[in-house]
Every structure is written in structure tokens, then in C-alpha cells.
């Protein structure tokens, strides 16, 4: 009887660890959006989740009812807690996909027709918002921690270097970043008293974005061997990096335009398939085996091609013999007639 209770307790603890981390993530997201703590029916229950965040320096009170997030400390705290639950999750779920960290975002915002946009300085002065003059008749302001450049043909929004967005996929990470971009643009509209939306909504492009798979096994092996891996594409830009960032081994895609697709459609399916191969077949698949399989396939294809060429040559010779026979037959019939 006692053994049964003990086993149940262990299962509950394993499940609770994952739920606690998800709840803390929800709290951090809420504070980021509203700069205040969420309202819970039970203050003691809320304090249970807030206390470790306060101790870790993630949550900081800046005034009466005003709370802010220390993103560097939150990232460190999140990764440590994630590491504690990761092994259990992988054991229970053979897929065990690692979270994707989106970061390094830069957006270009197309500004609709705004009166006096060429006189952006006057708009800033009128708004009484602090700004910094830049070269080329550009100006820089800061909104919700983001640097915003007011340039001739629109806006450029730079997300803070330490700000990361976590998701199970690159698309999910980007969706969270776009949610924050919308908050930044809404605040900017209120501060400058302008309208940036067209009838189709905000018109923007993602100029830069990086996505990293956290605790990637291949990156961990390279870091343990002290190997620096950077892969350059045909366009001369580095698109794949294996490094150690924010206390985690990361496989990161860095191409300015294609990183989302590289992670979502290339790396994630490939790495997840490698990870699940042993669970499906009972065999450990390594890169050397892949090269051997590819080499064998190439050899088979070459052998097939050689045989095909010899068959084609034989058919051609046979066709030539048939044509010669027809000509000889025609010559004989011509003589008889």
C-alpha cells in the first residue's frame, strides 16, 4: 500500500514540474504585456509561483503595481528549469522535440501616406518623446525596450539583443515576436499620434531573425570537442552555426531572409528524424552511416547507369543490323525483278 502511494507521488511530481514551468511562462508573458501581476483568486497560490521568479531576479518591482522582467535572468532560469524536465519528457514522449529560441529580430515597417513625414523631427518634438538624431535625416527613439529608427521610407524596429521567444516550432516563436511587434507599433502610434496601419493592417517585412534549437545533441558534441562549426551557403552568407549560448548547446540558423524556412522545413524535420530513428528501429544512426548509405546508393545508381548504357549500345547495334538486313533484302528483290 505504501509502495503504491510512493509511486503515485513520483508521477505527480514529474507532471507538476512541467506544469509549474508552463504557469511561470504564462506569468512572465502576462507581465511583459501588462507590466503588472495577474489577478488570481488565491493570492497564496500566485505567490507560490512568483516567489522563485523574484528570488531569481526575473521579476522586479519598479513602482506601485508596476513590474518588469529581467530577460537575461529569465532566459537563464527558464533553461535551467527546462533541463530538469527535459529528460522526463523525452522518456515519456519519443518525439521529445527541443524548444526553438527565436531572437535577433529586425523589422522594416512601411509607413502609409502621412502628412509631413519628411518633417519627422517636428512630429517627435511635438510628441515630447526623447530622440537621438542619426545620419541621413533619420531619428532613433525607444519604445517598450525596442530601438526604432524613423527613416525616409518608413521605420526600422530592432528588438533588444537579450530578448528571446520560445516555442516548439520556429513558426510559434515568430508568432510570439510578431505579437510583441504589434504592441510596439500600437504604443508608437499613441506616442507620435500617427496611424501606421493601412486598410490591410501593418505592412512589414522581417529583415533579420535567428532560430536556435536548444540543447541540440549535435551542437553539444561539437562543443565538447571544442569544434566551431559555421556553414556558408551559395550566396556567401553564414546560415548555420553550432555554438554555446545562454548556458545551452544550440544549433542555430542565422540567414537574414531564409532562417525561418531553414529551421522549420530543413533542420527540424531532419534532426527530429535522427532523434526518433533509434526509437523506431532500435538502431543508432550516425552521420557516418548516412554517408555510407549515400555512397552505396550512388554506387548502385552508377552500376545501373553502366548497365543501361551497355543495353542501349546493344539495342543500337541490333537496330543497325536489322536495317542492314532490310537493305540487303531489298537489293536482292530488286535483282530478281
Image: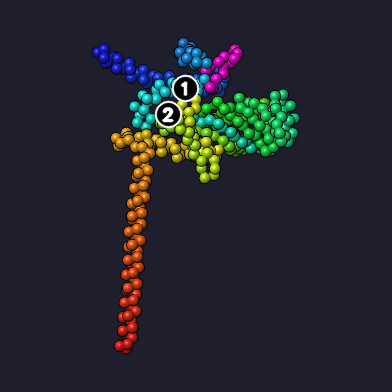
Colour mapping = rainbow
Which image quarter: residue 126? top right
Magenta-drawn stretch contains 130: no
Q: Residue at x 34, y 76 (%)?
A: 324
Which image quarter: residue 336? bottom left
Please give the residue where the numbered disc 1 appears in the rendered image: 78
Q: Decide which of 305, 165 is in the foreground and name it.
A: 305
Whichever of labels 1 and 2 marks the residue nearer the N terminus, that label is 1
Q: Residue at x 48, y 33 (%)?
A: 228
- Chain part drawn in magenta: 58-72
Please give the residue where the numbered disc 2 appears in the rendered image: 224
Question: Element type at marker 2?
Answer: helix
Q: Which residue ends up furthest to the left in the rendered image?
A: 1
Disc number for residue 158 = none
Residue 176 visible from this viewpoint: no
Q: Decide which of 159, 243 is in the foreground and name it.
A: 243
Question: Element type at marker 1?
Answer: helix
Q: Split into 4 quadrants, where in the image is the C terminus?
A: bottom left
Q: Decide which of 100, 251 is in the foreground and name it.
A: 251
Q: Position of residue 167 (x, y in %)?
A: 47, 29
At label 2, counting other C-alpha atoms closer than 10 Å, the crowd grade (few under 14, some 14-19, many 20 or more) is: few
CA distance for labels 1 and 2? 23 Å
- Mark 1 or 2: in front is 2
Q: How would you classify the magenta stretch by its main secondary structure?
A: strand
Magenta-drawn stretch contains 71: yes
Q: Determine whether, in the image, residue 41 is placed left or right of residue 113.
A: left
Q: Determine whether, in the image, residue 259 is placed left or right of residue 322.
A: right
Q: Position of residue 281 (x, y in %)?
A: 30, 37
Q: Position of residue 311 (x, y in %)?
A: 32, 63
Amino acid at each position: 500500500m505504501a509502495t503504491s502511494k510512493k509511486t503515485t507521488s513520483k508521477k505527480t511530481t514529474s507532471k507538476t514540474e512541467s506544469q509549474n514551468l508552463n504557469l511561470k511562462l504564462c506569468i512572465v508573458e502576462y507581465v511583459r504585456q501588462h507590466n503588472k501581476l495577474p489577478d488570481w483568486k488565491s493570492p497564496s497560490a500566485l505567490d507560490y509561483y512568483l516567489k522563485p521568479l523574484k528570488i531569481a531576479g526575473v521579476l522586479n518591482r519598479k513602482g506601485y503595481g508596476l513590474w518588469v522582467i529581467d530577460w537575461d535572468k529569465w532566459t537563464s532560469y527558464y533553461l535551467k528549469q527546462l533541463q530538469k524536465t527535459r529528460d522526463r519528457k523525452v522518456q515519456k514522449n519519443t518525439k521529445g522535440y527541443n524548444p526553438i529560441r527565436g531572437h535577433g529580430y529586425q523589422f522594416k515597417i512601411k509607413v502609409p501616406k502621412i502628412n509631413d513625414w519628411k518633417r519627422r523631427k517636428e512630429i517627435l518634438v511635438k510628441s515630447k518623446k526623447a530622440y537621438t538624431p542619426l545620419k541621413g535625416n533619420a531619428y532613433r527613439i525607444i519604445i517598450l525596450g525596442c530601438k526604432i529608427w524613423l527613416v525616409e521610407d518608413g521605420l526600422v524596429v530592432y528588438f533588444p539583443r537579450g530578448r528571446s521567444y520560445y516555442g516548439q516550432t520556429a513558426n510559434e516563436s515568430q508568432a510570439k515576436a510578431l505579437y510583441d511587434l504589434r504592441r510596439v507599433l500600437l504604443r508608437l502610434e499613441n506616442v507620435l499620434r500617427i496611424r501606421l496601419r493601412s486598410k490591410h493592417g501593418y505592412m512589414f517585412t522581417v529583415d533579420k531573425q535567428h532560430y536556435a534549437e536548444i540543447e541540440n545533441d549535435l551542437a553539444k558534441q561539437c562543443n565538447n570537442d571544442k569544434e566551431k562549426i559555421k556553414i556558408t551557403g551559395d550566396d556567401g552568407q553564414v546560415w548555420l552555426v553550432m555554438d554555446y549560448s545562454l548556458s545551452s548547446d544550440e544549433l542555430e540558423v542565422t540567414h537574414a531572409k531564409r532562417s525561418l524556412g531553414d529551421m522549420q522545413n530543413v533542420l527540424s524535420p531532419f534532426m527530429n528524424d535522427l532523434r526518433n530513428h533509434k526509437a523506431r528501429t532500435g538502431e543508432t544512426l550516425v552521420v557516418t552511416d548516412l554517408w555510407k548509405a549515400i555512397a552505396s546508393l550512388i554506387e548502385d545508381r552508377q552500376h545501373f547507369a553502366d548497365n543501361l548504357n551497355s543495353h542501349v549500345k546493344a539495342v543500337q547495334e541490333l537496330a543497325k543490323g536489322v536495317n542492314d538486313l532490310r537493305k540487303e533484302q531489298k537489293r536482292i528483290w530488286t535483282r530478281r525483278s
